[in-house]
Image (cartoon, coloured by chain):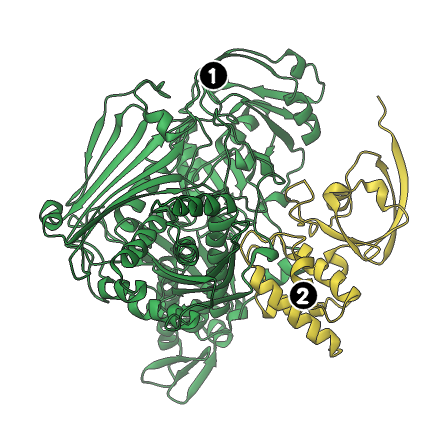
Chain colours: A yellow, B green
Amino acid sequence: MLEPTERITFDLDGRPVTTTVPTRRLLIDLLRDEFGCSGVRAGCDAGLCGACTVLVDGVPGTACLMLAVEADGRRITTIHGLAGPDGALHPIQHAFLEERALQCGSCTPGMVLLAAALLAECPDPDEATIRSWMSAALCRCGGGEAILRAVRRAAERMRAGQ
Amino acid sequence: MSAANDLERLRGSFAYAIDFALPGMLHAALVRSPHPHAEIVAIDLSQALSDSSVVAVATGADLAGLDPLQGVVVRDQPLLALGKVRYAGEPVVAVVARDAASAARAAARVAVRWRLLPPVPTMAAALAADAPALFDREAPEHFPKGPGAEAWREPARNILWRFRFRSGNPDHAFARAGHVFTDTYRFSRMSHLPIEPLCAVARWGGAAAEVWCNNQDPFLLRADLARIFALPEAAIRVHALPAGGGFGAKSYPKHEALCLLLSRLARAPVRLALSWDEMMLTLSQHAAEVTLTTAVSADGVLLARRGLLRLDGGAYADASVVVCEKGTYRSLPGPYRWHAVESLGEVVRTTTVPAGSFRGFGGPQACFAGERQIDAIARRLGFDPVAFRKRNLLRPGEAPWAGETPMDSDLEDGLDAVAERIGWKAPPPAGKGRGVAVGMKDGGGFSRRSLAVVKLARDGSALVLSGIADLGQGHERVAATIVAEVLGIDQSCVRLAPIDTDRTPHDQGTHASVGAAMVGLAIRRAAETVRERLLALAADVVDEASGPVMLEAGTIRRGNVTLSIPALFDRAFSPQGSELIGEGEARNPFDASAPLGSRCGFWMPSFAAAEVSVDPETGRLAVERLVVATDAGHALDHAGCRAQTEGGAVQGLAQALVEALAFDEDGRLANGTPLGYRMPSMLDLPPVFETITLEHGMGPGPHGAKGLGEHAVLAVAAAIANAAADACGVEIDALPLSPEAILFGRARVDEGGTG
């Protein structure tokens, strides 16, 4: 039985890509296996832990719950597309490093992308908004407090234009 | 501060075990028992084998010729079920196929015919007079230990292990008591659920059987694989790849041997990666029932405690024996001065998910009960809970009993620190309650030996070889701090090498918070050996000056001659370069006078204070403020200490409020999916959450450092429960503190009971 496939084109971290995928293939598998995006971390496979968070046209989504074909025509941002072209850390990544807002690092790419989407939408979020937004991913190392500190620090920095 | 791995983690390019692949690798999937207790009558593999992508299938019959049982102290868990299953979720068949989806599809086509046996879902059911036995009972075996301690294997039906420790004369102490209190507490069990599940790739054949995995005990695993497959240890090579969290789930051998067997059957490399659902079926924390009888003098001095720590070990031993002994011996008495102690621990077998290592290793169970009861006693006798504790806490240098390490933290200082931050001296705001707790556990391992090697290259950079697995706890930074200080080089020039049992010096495993203190000491000694060799080399080579040779900030100085490390290497070894290698060792030796055969490496107290409110309508408990302090001895990495303390505290908070595995009446996991099992998110963090890293400077590690991995989790659940009891006048005796538990407790109080 020949598996149905579809040809898709999308923007992956700022570069256009075209590929043919089985229609039932998950976006997480496409990104990890075909495009080498190992920073799209695999976790619960149920859209709950948020480790596989990517931005779809700037909006966070869990790649384990998306079909690859859903990426067609979209702009997909992974953690690999966040640092500058010269490799310089994004201010959010920098704030995570300064606040040591990572332990095992499994949740880190998803958390950083969530924060990026939040601060793009809302540069000066209040505490309740930060907590609510960042609760879309889980840190099993219990590093939530440090992540909150990092998001606050990044927001300040980015507002100051640093 | 060296942060190379953290930079990779932030960029998303850090390679974890789950990212590892070999060319031509096959994929395995497991068929698990749907029944908690059943005999396997027949297994029909025909449908599965008809799938053209299936390469190999294994059942219990394929374990013939192996030594196929795993477990710590007691080995009772087969790699695949042998004729019988003892919990719902036990692996029965393994299917190997060309890709993971095909393996899963074929596994779903395996048909097993069962003969059901009565389940034994709870400790009460297991201990009932007519309970079915999970195992054919062997004759009980008695194990004398050090002074006051002894243990029994299989002392009664469905009791895997019993341990007893006695110090002083309890009868005499109880006879003098002004008050005696007996209370029973129940402790629910959590699942570890690290974001990265267990994962292994194995390759049989060639010069060595090779395993790449995220197990945190590469050398214990190597020895276990050697035993199971009757191979020399030297013919087995284990790579402990960086892990995405662990919390105990990745300690001691797990499914790696099965993966290696599958590779042997399939004649190709095989990957066996578990899902979150499967992780919940592989290992859990121990549920517990703890009964404490405590004698207090008329004026509030603790005299004696008799305790029973009964742990639900689930279907197989895993690490239950050691969890039981450690929790019973070292955590049940708590951080107090006693005239007499009698601690009994039991591991009960049930037809549920096996329990084993979980951060705190028996400590959280014992500390929850112990600190709940101390608080209850203080309040019953009209004493201030902080003042009552301080009066009875061990003082620095005071041993809890003969043959044990004297207290190496200032417990009063720690309790004062959290009490002050929570504002203990002033009454809580109306409608709120406050509680404190002091957690207690040992660290540093049991008659332990750790080895480390430091290699200094010509350019002054250093490589550290140490068997401590990277679970995200920050060992890289600790190692870099230690080596950089000894050799006077920059921390960014120090790297921790990947773990490969062919090359890494032996270590007994990433356990008991040994990383900073014990292994840190081995690393420090290795660096000091390199330093001595560097100085000896300079004394030999620099002959144009005389006098002592100094090493300052990475520069060699003798008289008025200064040389950089590269220049010294060039003069000594030619510009082709070489290395200076140093070995270091740290031991926690056997000691016949110690009840467990060796004294603990150090004590790991933690201190927590909580302020909570309880909604009288719904029973919902809100932790509004939480302060947690730990004693790092000496902080080698302040941010890392804070991260460990916050992380442990959040795990304690989760234990208190939200996380609990639920089982149906037959012992099947009822919430065994990521969506069914509630975990804490940012929304569960207290609005005010502070941590304090104390540096009492009395640990055995560099500059008095202690390990810090397990402290924080110990005190938090009890502090929150004590605050809840204070807020609503209910004697909290079980976790988690669900709204129902609070409301039912209140209803009992309103009916005139004691809560």
Name the residue located 68 percent from the left edge and 70 percent from the top edge.
Answer: A154
Q: Quadrant of residue A88?
A: bottom right
Q: What is the three-letter code of the residue carrying label 2?
A: Gln
Label 1 environment density (alpha carbons within 10 Å; few <14, some 14–19, many ≥20): many
Residue B528 location in percent, x, y? 36, 68
Residue at image mark 1: B38
Horizontal side of A12 relative to B259 (left or right) equals right
Above or below, B381 against B98 in this view is below
Horizontal side of B400 relative to B515 (left or right) equals left
Labels 2 and 1 share a subunit:
no
- Chain letter behind tag 2: A
Horizontal side of B403 relative to B130 (left or right) equals left
Toward the viewer: B197 or B206?
B197
Secondary element at image label 1: strand
Above or below, B166 against B718 in this view is above
Q: Residue furthest bottom?
A: B560
Label 2 environment density (alpha carbons within 10 Å; few <14, some 14–19, many ≥20): many
Q: Is residue B626 visible?
A: yes
Q: What is the three-letter code of the residue carrying label 1?
A: Ala
Residue B317 location in percent, x, y? 37, 32
Residue at image mark 2: A93
Q: Is residue B477 visible?
A: no
